[in-house]
Amino acid sequence: MNLLDVEGLHVRYAGQAEDAVEGVSFSLAAGETLALVGESGSGKSTTGFAVLGLLPAQAHVRASRLDFAGQALLGASEARLREVRGGGIGMVFQDALSALNPLLSIGEQVAEAVRLHLPVSRAEARQRALGLLRQVRIAEAERRYDDYPHRLSGGMRQRVVIAMALAGEPQMLIADEPTTALDVTIQAQVLRLLADLQAERGLALLLITHDLGVVAEMADRVLVMRHGRALEQREVQALFSAPQHPYTRQLLAACPPLGALP
């Protein structure tokens, strides 16, 4: 049984003549990773935000089907969507510094996310937050708990955002360009962390990226997008070995051979 089913997703912004996302369909099962791939402006992030109802009010979303865990998200009440956001689907945003509140310590922010979704006391939320910080491999979690975001490196901030995404014990993560602006070594650490957490928790992962190296390492299936349309959707090995759409072939040709970079 699929955890997420999306059929015929359309997104159009008020005043625009064309859809930002046009007829995109995909599914995602527990423990599976689907990568949405394409250049900037292809509709990848818009698709991910549409699933969680995070698009601005001027965006009109329609779909033949938009179901999570067998329940319709399209047309769901705001209360129901709040339950799904974080409780069913965790969101890892690409700009960790903007995603974090500069006025609260990282520990407070993770604990707040815990209390939003789980019926625990403040003391229990703190202990859970410490546990999550340890799970995302922040060294000396107890000492770091009271640090503010500006005191952390970019890689550590991204780990905090991942911890917050896991706070409500979701079944699925949407990771929107999770390694943007990180150096190559830290990128690899963050990707390994996501893969390990996914394996430990049986999470479904919708990975939004333009990096085909990340796709090759992380994904089970790939959905290639351009101008808001789905051009090709295949198993990752099949796509890399024999791409069918001309645009997919162009994307692959534009990248250095995997493993060629130091």
Image: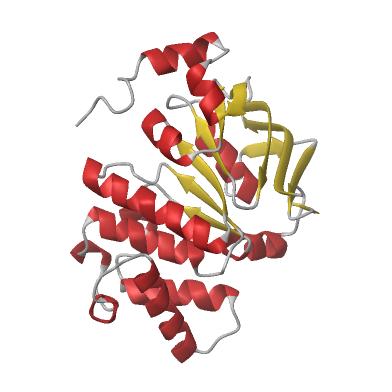
223 versus 104 height, above or below:
above
The answer to whether any part of residue 104 appears in the image is: no
Q: Residue at x 47, y 83 (%)?
A: 125
Residue 197 percent location from the top left of the image: 46, 60
* Count of all numbered marks drawn on residues in the image: 0
Quadrant of the rendered image containing residue 142: bottom left
Q: Quadrant of the C terminus?
A: top left
Residue 154 percent location from the top left of the image: 25, 54
The answer to whether any part of residue 250 appears in the image is: yes
Classify residue 254 as left or right of residue 8.
Answer: left
Residue 51 percent location from the top left of the image: 64, 46
Q: Residue at x 29, y 28 (%)?
A: 259
Q: Closer to the camera, 94 or 194?
A: 194
Q: Closer to the camera, 54 or 57?
A: 54
100 versus 106 height, above or below:
above
Q: Residue at x 67, y 59 (%)?
A: 81
Classify residue 88 as left or right of residue 188.
Answer: right
Residue at the extreme top: 246
Q: Residue at x 32, y 41 (%)?
A: 180
How is colour applied across the structure in the image?
secondary structure
83 versus 189 height, above or below:
below
Residue 157 percent location from the top left of the image: 30, 59
